[in-house]
Structure formats: C-alpha cells, structure tokens
Amino acid sequence: MKRVLTIQDISCLGKCSITIALPVISALGSEAVILPTALLSTHTMFNGFTVKDLSDQIEPIVAHWKQEDVRFDCIYTGYLGSIEQIDQVKEIFRTFRREDTVIFVDPVMADNGKLYPTFDMDYVRKNTELCREADIIVPNITEACLMTDMEYRVDHDEKYIRELMDRLCEFGAKITVLTGVCLEPGMTGVMGYDRDKDEFFLYQNRKIDATFHGTGDLFSSTCVGEIMKGRDWRDAMRIAADYTAHTIEVTMKDPKKPWYGVNFEETIPYLVNAE
Ligand code: PXL
C-alpha cells in the first residue's frame, strides 16, 4: 500500500485540510499519515477562531519517524501556518525524498483575488520557494498571480492563462497545474503542463455558480489519491475536477447544508468508483 504524508492544519470544525485529506486519501486506498501544522477551532472563514501553532512538535515527530525508518511515497502539503514552518517543511522534503517520492504542493494561501487572513506577501514569497521544490504544484489563479506578480483577473482569456502558466512553469515542477481556469462560458477546470513531455493539458467541466470552502483541498486530496493509485496525472486531474463539481452539486441540493463546507461524505462512493 502507498503511504502519503500530508502536512497541513487541523481545523477541528470546517471540513478542510486534514479533515478532508485523511478520509479522501484513505478511501482511495492509500495510507494517510498526518503532520498537523496548527490546531484551529475552525477554518479561518469563521469569526473568532482559535489557533495553536504546532511548529515545536514537528522536529520531535520527524526525529521519531527517522528512527522508525518510515518511508513515504508522496508528501502532500496544503495550508501551512508560518514562514518558519515552510523552512521546516523544506527540511522534511530533504529528509524523506527518495527517487520515486512525489512531492505535491498545494500553495494554499488565497482565493477569489484575496489572501486568506493571517498571510502576507512575505508568506507568498516563501510559498513560492516551496513550489520550486515540488514535483507537482496546483495553485489556483489567485495564488498563481500572487506568486508570479501578475494582475488577478476574474474574466480571463487563453492568452492570459498561457502567460500565467509560462511564469509558473519557471518554478520547475515536473507537473504544473493551474485550477479555476474558465475558457468557455459556463465552464471551469484546470490547465496543466508536463515538463518532460513539453505538453499542455486542458480540462473543462461545467461551472457551478457557487463557491464552497474546502473544495481546493478536496481537489488536491483526490489528485494525490488517484496518482497514488497509479493513475496518469491528467486522469487524476480530470477525476478530481469532476468529483469536486459533483460534490458541489450534491451539496447545493441539501436544504440543511452547512455554510462552511461541502457534503463530500455523501459523494465518497462516487469517488471510489470514478474512472
Ligand atoms: O481550505 C483551505 C484552508 C485550510 N485551512 C485553513 C483555512 C483554509 C482556508 O481558508 O482557513 C485553516
């Protein structure tokens, strides 16, 4: 069985980061090992959330794993707490990276043209450094614009997306994926670039007029789980995009849906059977 280390926060309530990564990666048949970066009462879209930084736990946990000679097939990072933590994560890459370890970085820090509360431009620069060490990066358009110094545009055309992709590809990842790419009315999806094959990939599916929290984490966790299943990265992205859209649709039909996240629990059977 493949073993995935995921490094992100625990938002106790809120259906994002580790509380999505764990069930999704497990459902797709890989062992999910967690390294929590911070403990929050909720995600940061709630008012009055509490945060306990867990940076001081990282070193002893990693030291113990080294003693146990633990190996990972993938290291997947999402929301990290601080600039110092990004240095700790880089060190973890150095410690556990083997020839066939997939380093998957989702530089979670912004959406819809805005940085999340708690982050600033120094954090953006540091997250850019982390992306330079990855095999696969999956920023959304807002994160990509911040990291490449481009203007954020809600309405975009292919020329704009290509320019953004060109700048992102300079980070040197084997696979560069930009999410939230809308190139046809009513559609949204991803554009990817495979460095070794020098090939672009565009996948568009129906755009649902709603934004829900945690859907980026759902997309990334699904990609990781599918890649660990041996799926080609293009198929993994297609399945993840379809699964995310399907989950949003199912959530919208629930009159009792919570405002803070999607009903991914209901759609796990769909995911497990996705081809
Ligand atoms: O879904 C991304 C995410 C993860 N973790 C925390 C967040 C967010 C987005 O706001 O606040 C704590």
Image (cartoon, rainbow, N blue to C red):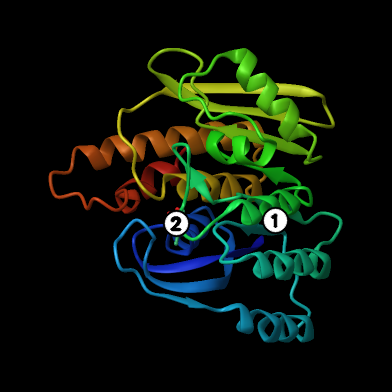
- Cα gap from disc 1 to disc 2, whole angstroms: 16 Å
Label 2 lies in ligand 1 vicinity (Cβ under 8 Å): yes
Mark yes or no: residue 275 visible.
no
Whether 76 is drawn above or below 9: the answer is: above
In screen coordinates, is 67 left or right of 107? right
Relative placement, left or right, of 87 versus 267 is right
Type of amino acid under label 2: Pro
What residue is drawn where x is 30% and y is 34%? 210
Residue under label 1: 126
In this rendering, is residue 155 above or below 150? above
Regarding mark 1 in the picture, which secondary structure is present there? helix
Query: Residue 237's spot in the image, x, y percent?
Result: 57, 35
Relative to residue 263, is residue 30 depicted above or below?
below
For ligand 1, tell me if the residue under mark 1 lies within 8 Å: no
Q: Quadrant of the N terminus?
A: bottom right
Dot 2: what SS? Answer: loop
Residue 131 lies, in percent from the top left, at 72, 48
* Residue that label 2 marks: 117
User: Are there few (<14), some (14-19), or many (20+) residues within 10 Å of tag 1?
Assistant: some
Task: Confirm or deny contact between disc 1 and disc 2 (CB under 8 A).
Answer: no
Q: Is residue 189 visible?
A: yes
| Residue 62 location, quadrant | bottom right
For the point 43% across and 43% down, the residue is 271
Q: Residues within 10 Å of mark 2 (few under 14, many from 20)?
A: few
Mark toward the start of the polypeptide (1 vs 2): 2
Q: Image point 42% across, 45% down: which residue?
A: 215
Residue 80 in percent (x, y) is at 58, 63
The quarter of the image that holds ligand 1 is bottom left
Residue at 79 percent of width and 52 percent of height:
133
Residue type of the residue flagged with mark 1:
Lys
Q: Is residue 207 above or below residue 46?
A: above
* Residue 263 rendering spot, x and y as whole percentages: 29, 49
